[in-house]
Image (cartoon, rainbow, N blue to C red):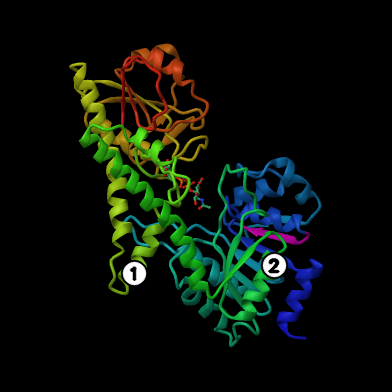
Amino acid sequence: MSRKTELLQKIETREARIGVVGMGYVGLPLAVALVEAGFSVVGIDVDQAKVALLNAGRSYVEDVADGALRPLVESGKLRASADYADLADVDAISICVPTPLRKTKDPDISYIINAADNIARCGGTGKLIILESTTYPGTTEEIIVPRLISNGDVIGQDVFVAFSPERIDPGRTDYTVWTTPKVIGGMTPDCLDVAMALYGTIVEQPVPVSSTAAAEMVKLLENTFRAVNIGLVNEMALMCDKLGLNVWEVVDAAATKPYGFMKFTPGPGVGGHCIPLDPHYLSWKLKTVNYTARFIELAAEVNSHMPDYVVGKVADALNTDRKAINGSRVLILGIAYKPNVGDVRESPALDVIHLLQERGAVVSYHDPYVADLTSEWFEMASVELTAVTLQQADCVVIITNHADYDWAWIAEQAGLIVDTRNAIEGEGNGRVVYL
Ligand code: SAJ
């Protein structure tokens, strides 16, 4: 029996044992979905604290409730480990490790390399290896494959390799692992067949493409599409400001077009661990072939300028009250990178606070999802949001429009507001400055 047939049978009967490397916001939901599909899963994570929490049936990922996790652990079908050696006897491995940027904006694939080295060390023969981490086209072929064939194994015969970009969207409830189509590219047709078979057990619509590089590029298009369109609408905000137009009115009216338009809204910048970072994996790769990814670089330039633009708006607003930024009390509402989450990674709020402090403002923040904050520039704790804190602020700056906020009440209490999200729509005492 060929190794491919053996793997396909084990997947069909659910005898296949699966390893998931990286038990974060991508790996843990994937592991849960695989166990719910009938597989036994070992989750590998270098963070011993995460391993202990998972083996105690406790989740640290918003989208996975303890109540969903605990029975899977208690049944013995899901366990966590910090020891890569536990991958020796699994049949398939999904790699879901971080792919951050270095300070130089170059890709940091050290987590992928570490995972690949450890997987090769415990033996890839007879296994399906799927990389999920967002990365530049060519990573699977250049980093994963060489480590798996160094023992003489042949890709597509002895070991099977694919790439399948993650589409886990923390906090989203309208799409699940099952209902979100999943793109899959194999190193060979047989690799694709095996990967499609495995992911076909947890995803309603696996989407095959012709190669791992194509699959890697799909993910980068998805997130570059967002970064560029957010950059476009942010530049629209700058242009509307120059022309004395209300960008929110313009965007809302354009969004009535029932076809050929997709609404994006301006803001104080682009945060999160995907959109501000992933496109730089693509522009970096293109530089290696002497090509400049102009849209990516321009979008990054526009988006990263927005915090400066917001601080300029604050300065102008205070100036109307004959106040300088220096010494003014500025209250930031919402510092998470997007509404209704507590994640502050790459949040533009951090840049706005830093820039305001650099100009002498006395800055505080409130965020119902972020109790305290440590950044490279400062440490802060969320203040209590009361009428007094609003009234005492010389300027209130709305950075993240969490659904929890009572905007009408805030508009009544605050003397001056810079609203970067059009949250105070049509309310307020006329003392609201919009982007
Ligand atoms: N942003 C704007 N204007 C917009 C949209 C976003 O300023 O019109 C800002 C947000 O405030 C945030 C940043 O851009 O700071 C990124 O926002 P995002 O909506 O892209 O949120 P992310 O980073 O959580 O993106 C994820 C992605 N999901 C995956 O990669 C699986 C993205 O593809 C999703 O479309 C997005 O969530 C989503 O729609 O929630």
Q: Can see residue 276?
A: no
The reply to whether the magenta stretch includes residue 41 is yes
Q: Nearer the viewer, residue 237 or 48?
A: 237
Tell me which numbered mark, 1 or 2, is placed earlier along the sequence: 2
Residue 15: horizontal and vertical position, in percent?
80, 68
Q: Nearer the viewer, residue 246 or 275?
A: 246
Q: Quadrant of residue 80?
A: bottom right
In the picture shown, does residue 331 fall above or below 349?
Answer: above
| x 53%, y 75%: residue | 211
Q: For mark 2, give the secondary structure.
A: helix
- How far apart marks 1 and 2 lie (CA) works out to 32 Å
Q: How many C-alpha atoms fall within 10 Å of the one at disc 1: few (<14), some, or many (≥20)?
A: some
The residue at which mark 1 appears reads as 286
The reply to whether the magenta stretch includes residue 386 is no
On the rendered structure, is 87 left or right of 401? right
The residue at which mark 2 appears reads as 198
Residue 142: horizontal and vertical position, in percent?
46, 76
Q: Quadrant of residue 23?
A: bottom right
Residue 312: horizontal and vertical position, in percent?
23, 32
In the picture shown, does residue 299 fall above or below 402?
Answer: below
Q: Quadrant of residue 308?
A: top left
Q: Quadrant of the C terminus?
A: top left
Which range is magenta? 38-44
Which amino acid type is marked by label 1?
Leu
